[in-house]
Amino acid sequence: MPRKNDYKVQGLDCAEEVAILRREVGGLPGVIDLEFDVVNARMSVEFDPDATSSEQIVAAVDATGMAAVPWELRARRSDAGLWERHGRLLMAAAGGAFLLSGFVTHCVLAGGAMAALAGGRDGADFPMAVLVQYAASVMFGGWYVAPKAAWALRRLRPDMNLLMIVAVIGAMLIGEWFEAATVAFLFATALLLEHWSVERARNAIGALLDLSPPTARVLHAEAGGAHAHEMPVGDVAVGSTIVVRPGERIPLDGVVTRGESSVNQAPITGESMPVAKAPGDEVHAGTINHDGALEFRTTRGASDTTLARIIHMVENAQARRARSQQWVDRFAVWYTPAMMAAAVLVAVVPPLAAGASWAVWFYRALVLLVIACPCALVISTPVAIVSALTASARAGVLVKGGAYLEAAGRLKALALDKTGTLTCGRAEVQTLVPLDGHTEAELLARAAALEAHSEHPLARAIRRKARAAGVRAPAAETFRALKGRGAEAVIGGRAFWIGSHRLMHEKGQETEAIHARALELEDAGHTVVAVGNDTHVCGLISVADSLRDGVGDVIRAVKRAGVRRVIMLTGDNEGTARAIAAEAGVDEFRCELLPEDKVEAVGRLVRQHKHVAMVGDGINDAPAMAAATFGIAMGAMGTDAALETADVALMSDDLSRLPWLIGHSRRTLRVIKQNIGFALALKLVFILLTLAGAASLWMAIAADTGATLAVVFNSLRLLGGRRTPGGRPASQ
């Protein structure tokens, strides 16, 4: 039966290494599939254990000059040795030191810098002391490159490592020892910077791990009362009682059993304001307890918390690669061999065809090899994607892959569910209309008394309104339910009734004025509840699911971001749908829809606009979300189904994350295009300069190193400094 193992691969920093591993590990017998996560330096191998073993896979990786260990045995960065943590820096520094000392020595012996730079075409003008130092610089600069180049040469699979080694050896053969050492040092520096940039992106994801404390304070019942003991979160059993003091991070998911406090949920949801917590409320690992001690009962183990699932999804997001990343990977496969072939042609065609100098055109071929290095091109896209994904997670927007991040930037139409998305998802009293001399307080008191025993959503809304208004409901006697219409009871010795517009009509107490007012409320999308006694109607109460705060601003922001059509989908009647649509400012609405109707509606939008997102609760709207280009789940924190169903999960119920996501996605696309365009343009310019004889080896490697730096730092801009809709830095 096939097995799937993950490995930590030291030296896996860009797509070139991925190509090497695909050839070496993928060629082993029994290997079925390979997946790579460059940012986390992880390789996933699905293989037949009867045909190959984990030890053979590790050996195959080691043969390439990289090193692999099973993922579960990987060492934390703090446990790594000096060489593992700083080997690249030490080698690059040593190479630079010998390059500098060799040049200074040459300057002293040759009588000046210009004389040192001009001498040595055949190696005769280089004193032995200078040659030794330049050779040492080449050795240290190529320390990490040479093993990979040897592997590529043995298998006739040219890559950028072989390309660099050939250029360095060629420079030494024609006596350009200074340039050979310079190329080796600058290339080692470029690889060091590339490694650092990937490490920074890795550390940004690793910082999510630090959100949850390593230990928890667990209450144990003992003689003399309960006592708290510190223990690792991984050892805490589900159902244990945890104590969290003010200012501490909450270690696990659970439900509050004792105490009241406010909790900062920004690390998971991006919410700028703390959320009040009391017994019965959920708390989540990684959030911060503010001003009161809390006791809570754990509901999930350490590996299954909302935070743990978020970290797992962010780490795996690279598997769903963006289209631009896929294009760069395909481009790199043929680019390096093509450039090596071009260098050979540059070296031999002009001397053979036109009698040109072999030395001159051989040197130009070496320059072409150096500038052809695809490092800047292949590293910029994955760094940009993972930086953007991590910034999104910090802002409470969980995007499950680069493909969906790109899709958000191309969005043309947005479909939104009504209940729980555009609206709060809970019926609330909207309007009180007291009649016949009654006050609002009297109307609420009678209604609350009549609905005291009902669990209908309308009854709960009326009771909530009475409590909020400080109105105490009197006792109701001889209560009798009127099936499908309302209820009757005696209050203070007098009979009262409560019910629908239809019941009011049946009672014969509806005047033209009352009828007109009831119709006005119903046309606005409200459900009308009438309260009356045996002589008259005491008043009307309208109940409706209210629109979320700021929905209109969000819809306008989405349109400004370039979305052409915003459509509301709902199963409600046309009157309610029309009223909510008008208030929200959507372009159109579809009402009285069954789940299958929503799927059909979204499918039609995809055919019309191609790039369509569906926003829902991640459970009831799952079929429609699947029919869209990508689905967005609202309020997914702690909701397993929402996290698993959607391609994008808004961890809080904040719709303002939608325009933020679109803007963030488009900024990411701009950065990727800038990176690719700059890297290719610089290479084209230097290729032309090389053919014209205006570029040297050290100029080419300096330009390539500069390009790598530029695209990496441009990508890392996506990590920080951007503000979420609430005005809070996304990196908080």
Image (tube, rainbow, N blue to C red):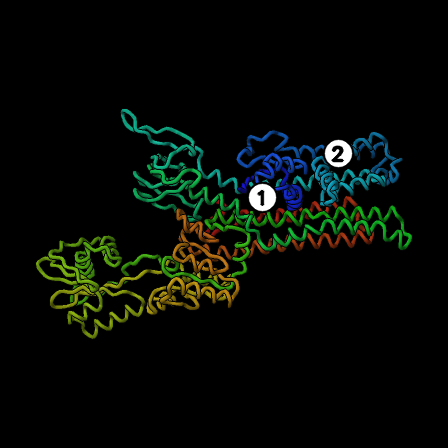
Q: Amino acid at mark 2?
A: Met
- For disc 1, the neighbor class at 10 Å (few under 14, some 14 to 19, many from 20) is many
**Residue placed furthest toward the bottom:** 512
What residue appears at the point 44 percent right and 66 percent down from the top-left corner?
Answer: 601
Q: Would residue 200 be visible to someone looking at this image?
A: no
What residue appears at the point 85 percent right and 39 percent down from the top-left corner?
Answer: 175
- For disc 2, the neighbor class at 10 Å (few under 14, some 14 to 19, many from 20) is some
Report the label total: 2
Q: From the viewer's side, name the closer residue of 361 and 693.
A: 361
Nearest to N terminus: mark 1 or mark 2: 1
Element under disc 2: helix
Q: Residue 513: image x %, image y %?
A: 21, 73
Identify the residue position indicated by label 1 in the image.
39
**Residue placed furthest toward the top:** 223
Q: Residue 243: image x %, image y %?
A: 35, 34
Q: Amino acid at mark 1?
A: Val
Q: Quadrant of residue 688?
A: bottom right
Q: Quadrant of residue 122?
A: top right
Identify the residue position indicated by label 2 in the image.
139
What residue appears at the point 49 percent right and 47 percent down from the top-left corner?
Answer: 393
